[in-house]
Amino acid sequence: DTGDLLPISWQRIRHDPDLLAKDLKPAIIALVDAPQLARRPGRLIEAITLLKRRFPGALMWTPGISGPDNLAPLTWFGVDLHDQVRSRQCAASGFVLTASGPRKIEESGEPDVDHWAIAIAEVRRAIRDSSLRELADRQALTSPRLVEHMRRYDDLMAESTDHLSQIVDN
């Protein structure tokens, strides 16, 4: 029994038959190797999609990859819980993580802006206005990797829709 939190890695997704147990109903899924998967083309999106389909009622957490610069796309993909690990790593290196990515902290005494609060407010507003996809598309333009993730997500959703329409048509 894993309790409410189910830590899962790519290897576990691929090789652990216990994940197919019908009585397995975690409240939260932690994709523990999310930083590594985010660097491999398609892997992060495939893992999130597989886990959301297998455990539709569970909240998804991808530790270590969220930031004000990718909050909208990750939320669009199905990530529900976000942490500030990347922001803390940036701060430790003399950078601030903004909506457009990391930038050097200025010594000029610029005002302290809560980039997370702004990003969260934008995502909430986009969800309320049914415009999360548009916000995710705009935010993805800050990173070639995010553009790649958006394309892979769209491909997986199209494959899923095609498969469903084939079932319905037969």
Image (cartoon, rainbow, N blue to C red):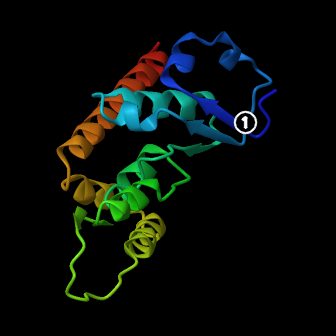
Whether residue 159 can be seen here: yes
Nearest the viewer among 13 and 21 is: 13
Nearest the viewer among 115 and 88 is: 88
Residue at figure coordinates x 53%, y 35% from the top left: 31
State which quadrant residue 96 falls in: bottom left
Amino acid carrying mark 1 in the image? Pro
Residue at figure coordinates x 39%, y 61% from the top left: 87
Q: Say if 27 sits above or below 54 in the image.
A: below
* Residue 153: % across, % down: 34, 36
Residue at figure coordinates x 22%, y 82% from the top left: 107
Q: Say if 85 sits above or below 127 in the image.
A: above
Decide if residue 114 is on the left or right side of residue 135.
right
10 Å crowding of disc 1: few (<14), some (14-19), many (20+): some
* Residue 119: % across, % down: 39, 69
State which quadrant residue 67 falls in: bottom left
Nearest the viewer among 1 and 74 is: 1
Whether residue 68 can be seen here: no
Quadrant into which the N terminus falls: top right
- Location of mark 1 (residue): 26
Q: Say if 33 sits above or below 116 in the image.
A: above
Secondary structure at badge 1 equals loop
* Residue 94: % across, % down: 28, 66
Q: Say if 63 sits above or below 130 in the image.
A: above
Nearest the viewer among 27 and 100 is: 100
* Residue 33: % across, % down: 47, 32
Q: How many marks?
A: 1
Residue at figure coordinates x 36%, y 65% from the top left: 91
